[in-house]
Amino acid sequence: MDKLVISGGLPLRGTVEISGAKNAALPILVGTVLTGAKCTIENVPDILDVDLTLEILEKMGARIVRRHNTVEIDTADVRPGTSPSDLVCKMRGSTYLIGAELGRFLYAKVGSSGGCDFGARPIDQHIKGFEALGASVDARGYFVEAKAEKLVGREIYFDLVSVGATINAILASVFAEGVTVLENAAREPHVVDLANFLNACGANVVGAGTDTIKIKGVKQLHGATYAIIPDMIEAGTYMFAAAATHGRVKINNVIPKHLDSISAKLSEMGVAVEELDDAIIVDATGPLAAINVKTRPYPGFPTDMHPQMTALLCFATGTGRVTEDVYDNRFRYVEELRKTGANIAVSGKTATVEGCGGEGLVGAPMKSVDLRGGAAMVIMGLAVSGRTEITEIHTIERGYNDIVRKLTALGADIRKIAY
Ligand code: EPU
């Protein structure tokens, strides 16, 4: 097993390149199944969730060649119902197999998916979408099995905003007869990226990025070459790490618009954020003010930046609050952060941080409980004085491409060591 060892207290300085977005790469890689052809996907991040997705697709019959950040994938021989459950259960993104298999083969059978533990993560809205299109879905046991004689476009109103349900409904309806209209759809950039990829393959998806998405069924798709958008959460994590360490970092290869809510909150804290065409400069040499944040679906402040925000508030002065409005329970990381001496109290859906400007906080051993919780621990370790050790780092490597190399290049003292 590996752990991260950080000697904290050094301001981050320099330039970091952001990789392709995890939450766009997963549905796009799975979406290639719909094409039954050869696709070339560029800017694919080198992270464990991508490794897992490609392994699953390969076991289902896809032919895959991976060179650096480019993946060539031919899904002609993929067979539905053949995804290995022992891999599927490790990742939430594997639910996308249901939509892709159903869309192409009118049949899907996929084991129960996994992913970070934030309490219950139901898929009732995914199922609502499949059923509206005419599929019968059996999700009583370990497997979700969906089948249809044919799929017919309908209006689907989601009871809540769900990234996964929106993506699955798009995947399932690409070949459905007529027009599918998704109402109260998720507006995240990765939903738009999937729609753009599918359109590049010959699909007709309109309105992604708004809360109404229309999918006009087409007869078939073809292969395409497509580059994945930059990862807004990876970018946001480096922005917060720069701020917590009072550093100055240029974050390259980003779409600044995607980072609006993150940049706005940093500005509110007194950090100078400068937007360039495809880069952002974060300059946090001054003191940090405490603020309140509530997570919301895009374009609100992302839940996937919540733990990192809690860590950052520990280095502000005054009382800050982070209210989680997307998940029931995303606070498991708090107990670990407290080991540094941080004063964080959780009540209901709100973490209250008594910021002390970082005074008196010291490095500690922490166990990464999930991807973004682990990222918060890294920020904490970088910004406090002394030595921090973080175990269970596979949870972090699920979503952060080359984090040790990137932070080292910014001047951090961070090493990955086997133990
Ligand atoms: N929900 C339901 N029923 C459903 C679907 C969702 O009640 O059928 C609830 C969820 O329990 C949650 C809320 O709706 O409370 C939002 O969930 P959503 O479906 O939007 O999340 P997801 O698709 O499971 C993706 C990302 C997560 C990210 C969320 C929210 C992927 C693979 N995962 O999950 O990413 O937190 O959207 O933006 O895209 C991460 O990257 O660290 C991560 C956890």
Image: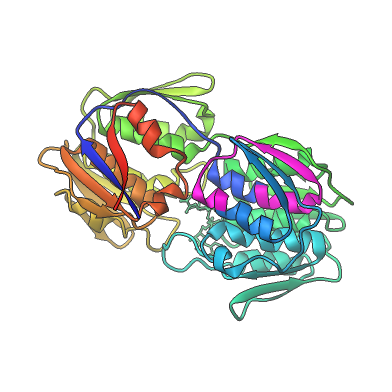
What x and y, as percent, mark residue 196? 71, 39
Q: Is residue 90 above or below residue 401?
A: below
Q: Residue at x 54, y 19 (%)?
A: 277
Q: Nearer the viewer, residue 218 or 411?
A: 411
Residue 176 picture quarter: bottom right
Q: Is residue 373 above or below residue 41?
A: below
Q: Residue at x 51, y 64 (%)?
A: 114
Q: Is residue 407 left or right of residue 254?
A: left
- Looking at the rendering, the stretch of residues picked out in magenta corresponds to 29-51
Q: Residue at x 84, y 44 (%)?
A: 222
> In which quadrant will I find the N terminus?
bottom left
Q: Is residue 412 above or below residue 207?
A: above
Q: Nearer the viewer, residue 49 or 217?
A: 49
Q: Is residue 96 left or right of residue 361?
A: right
Q: Nearer the viewer, residue 324 or 109?
A: 109
Residue 289: in magenta span: no
Which residue is farthest front? 419
Which residue is farthest right? 219
Name the colour scheme: rainbow
What x and y, as percent, mark residue 145? 69, 74
